[in-house]
Image: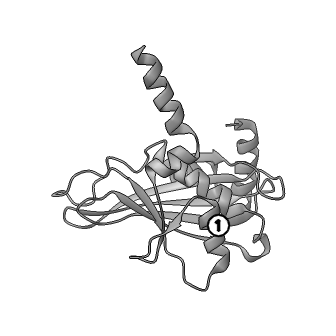
């Protein structure tokens, strides 16, 4: 990650919000630079991950990713929620692009970075949903997309998600994502070489 670039954008964001570096650092726990969108511009993402106890021994876990362009303009957000189930192995993502920035591939590159955070960095593993349940081990991510939202369906398909006919949600598994990125193949090649 280019710290100079992200630092410059971070300063612009802080100035727009009127907050200090200290206030910003309390709120943000992870920073990302994405691949360029359709217009060739890199995007800058700042994550705020929160675990909240909603009842004794029961927790919600969610990450909000705020997306900015190089001018420090807020262009989109993505939010990832750990599903509150006994298996605790799935995340649902919601997102929204500011209207004037739609059609630039922002959600596609942002979604790719969030999936990397979930599946490669394992940022959503080992969390507590309920104290009586096992810790989280995320194996799939879903997008709840309405039937009439053609643009979001294209984003999902371009990002490797497929429609789950049972649930009506678009879904991608950890294995599918790692294969898509060539990460699984590289890991398998390394394991094969280690055996020689």
| Residue at image location 57% in from the left, 39% down from the top | 182
Is residue 93 rendered to the left or right of residue 154?
left
Is residue 4 rendered to the left or right of residue 50?
right
How crowded is the residue under tag 1: few (<14 C-alpha within 10 Å), some, or many (20+)? some
Q: Nearer the viewer, residue 167 or 32?
A: 167
Determine the secondary structure under disc 1. Answer: helix
Q: Is residue 86 above or below residue 30?
A: below
Q: Is residue 92 above or below residue 186?
A: below
Residue that protrudes farthest toward the right in the picture: 39
Is residue 44 rendered to the left or right of residue 145?
right
- Residue 24, given in percent of the width and then of the height, sits at 59, 52
- Residue 65, given in percent of the width and then of the height, sits at 57, 59
| Residue at image location 76% in from the left, 54% down from the top | 12
Residue that protrudes farthest toward the left in the picture: 132
Indicate how the structure is coloured in the image: one colour
Q: Nearer the viewer, residue 20 or 163?
A: 163
| Residue at image location 22% in from the left, 60% down from the top | 130
Which quarter of the rendering shows the N terminus? top right
Is residue 113 rendered to the left or right of residue 102?
left
Q: Quadrant of residue 103?
A: bottom right
Find disc 1 in the rendering and name its residue: 155
- Residue 15, given in percent of the width and then of the height, sits at 73, 57
- Residue 160, given in percent of the width and then of the height, sits at 57, 58
Whether residue 118 appears in this view of the structure is no
Which quarter of the rendering shows the C terminus? top left
Whether residue 101 appears in this view of the structure is yes
């Amino acid at each position: 990650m280019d710290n100079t670039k992200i630092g410059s954008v971070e300063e612009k964001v802080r100035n727009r919000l009127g907050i200090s570096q200290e206030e910003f650092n309390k709120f943000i726990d992870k920073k990302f630079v994405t691949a360029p969108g359709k217009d060739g511009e890199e995007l800058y993402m700042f994550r705020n991950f929160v675990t909240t106890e909603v009842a004794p021994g029961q927790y919600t876990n969610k990450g909000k990713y705020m997306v900015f362009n190089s001018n420090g303009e807020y262009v989109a957000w993505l939010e990832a929620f750990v599903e509150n189930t006994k298996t605790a192995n799935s995340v649902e993502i919601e997102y929204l692009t500011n209207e004037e920035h739609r059609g630039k591939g922002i959600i596609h590159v942002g979604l790719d970075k969030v999936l990397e955070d979930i599946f490669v960095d394992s940022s959503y593993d080992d969390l507590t949903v309920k104290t009586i349940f096992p810790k989280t081990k995320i194996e799939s991510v879903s997008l709840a997309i309405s039937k009439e939202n053609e643009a979001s369906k294209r984003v999902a398909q371009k990002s490797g998600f497929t429609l789950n006919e049972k649930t009506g949600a678009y879904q991608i598994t950890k294995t599918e994502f790692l294969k898509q990125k060539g990460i699984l193949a590289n890991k398998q090649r390394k394991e094969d070489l280690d055996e020689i």
